[in-house]
Amino acid sequence: MSILKSLSEKDTTTIIRLALKYPPATRALLGAMMDELQWTNLAEPLYKSLNPLTKYPLTGAKKALSTPEKWNIE
């Protein structure tokens, strides 16, 4: 998350655009990290790209993130 914080707005939008081509678990993790940084408006495209019924098992992510339920991270 410290790396995300240090990026410019242009780099952040590029990461989001590229992340949309990655698997859903990756998009969920990036979106949850952006929520953690309170960048919910930037994370919206990632959230909309996910299937709301799918759960993403990511070991240890629940400990580091405050909103894993929103992103279906287990």
Image: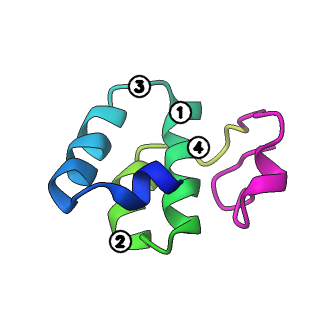
Q: Are marks 4 and 1 in contact (CB under 8 Å)?
A: yes
Q: Are marks 4 and 3 in contact (CB under 8 Å)?
A: no
Secondary structure that dominates the magenta span:
loop
Q: Which residue is mark 4?
A: 29
Q: Which residue is mark 3?
A: 22
Measuring from the top left, give residue 36's x and y in whole percent: 59, 66
Magenta segment boundaries in residue numbering: 56-74
Give the residue displayed 81% in from the left and 43% down from the top: 74
Q: Amino acid at mark 3?
A: Tyr
Q: Are marks 3 and 1 in contact (CB under 8 Å)?
A: yes
Q: Is 31 on the left or on the right of 67, as rendered?
A: left
Q: Amino acid at mark 4?
A: Leu
Give the residue displayed 51% in from the left and 55% down from the top: 2
The crowd level at tag 4 (other Cα within 10 Å; few <14, some 14-19, many 20+) is many
Q: CA distance from mark 1 to mark 2?
A: 18 Å
Tell which residue pokes out farthest to the left in this image.
10
Q: CA distance from mark 4 to mark 3?
A: 11 Å
Q: Nearer the viewer, residue 6 or 18?
A: 6
What is the secondary structure assignment of the residue under circle 1? helix
Q: Which residue is mark 1?
A: 26
